[in-house]
Amino acid sequence: QKEVEQNSGPLSVPEGAIASLNCTYSDRGSQSFFWYRQYSGKSPELIMFIYSNGDKEDGRFTAQLNKASQYVSLLIRDSQPSDSATYLCAVNNGAGANNLFFGTGTRLTVIP
Amino acid sequence: SQTIHQWPATLVQPVGSPLSLECTVEGTSNPNLYWYRQAAGRGLQLLFYSVGIGQISSEVPQNLSASRPQDRQFILSSKKLLLSDSGFYLCAWSLGLSNQPQHFGDGTRLSIL
């Protein structure tokens, strides 16, 4: 049983559009949620985290959390070619030592 | 600010050879430390984590081992590498509190010949 699921994509959006990335998780006890960006051949980089239901905005990025529906999403406004990367969703269910369960990622391509 | 160093960046090893990858964290005390492996085109697989010196938890049985000889040093080892050990190895740290994000090093790309 997969803990965290993401559409592998690829997701293609034109430059300047809104990219919407979705993630569902299976453990209702999950407490914290993270989005990482991973460029090809590079390590994951934390871009957003959210703990409470609702929206959290940081620049062009908005994370949305709905615990009742067990999904978390990431919106990227005014998408740029430099946003082209794989986006990993990670969930902490409060067990272990801050252990995160990662999805397999969604590959985003922003077309100039 | 905290930084994490991981080396080497790339490594090519023959089957059956030993392995030692090292990771160090600066700017924080008593971090949680993690080793992951990412196979080509796949997700992150947690291999080991540590909440303190000498405390190692293994998530996946395999021919790898980990050690934490100092507070901010984490080492991944193998006595005899297998072809299936190829991959991108990532070290990460987090604060020793609940619900904290993990921060990754630059990774080591390991190729087994």
Image: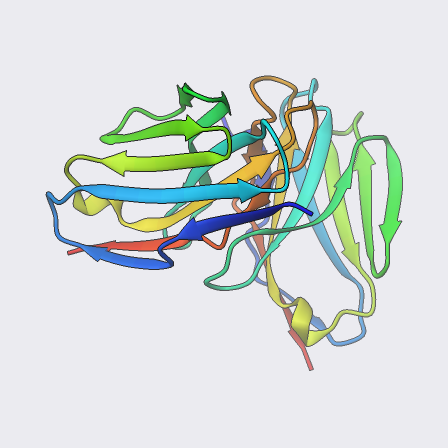
Towards the viewer: B18 or A102: B18
Q: Identify the image quadrant of the C terminus of chain A.
A: bottom right
Q: Is residue A80 left or right of residue A58?
A: left
Asked which quadrant contains residue A13, the reply is bottom right
Q: Position of residue A40 (x, y in %)?
A: 49, 64
Q: Residue B39: x, y in percent?
A: 36, 48
Q: Looking at the picture, tell me which residue is in the foreground, B36 or B103.
A: B103
Residue depicted at x 89% and y 37%: A54
Residue depicted at x 75% and y 76%: A15
In the rendered image, residue A33, in percent from the top left (x then y), is placed at 71, 35
Q: Is residue B75 above or below residue A44?
A: above
Q: Residue B98 appears at what percent x and percent y? A: 69, 23
Going 46% across and 22% down the picture, which residue do you hit?
B53
* Depicted A9 relative to depicted A91: above or below: below
Q: Is residue B110 left or right of residue B9?
A: left
**Number of numbered callouts drawn:** 0
Seen from the viewer's position, the closer of residues B70 and A4 is B70
| Above or below B48: residue A102 | below
Q: What colour scheme has been applied to the protein in the rendered image?
A: rainbow
Q: Nearer the viewer, residue A25 or A95?
A: A95
**B86 left or right, relative to B75:** left
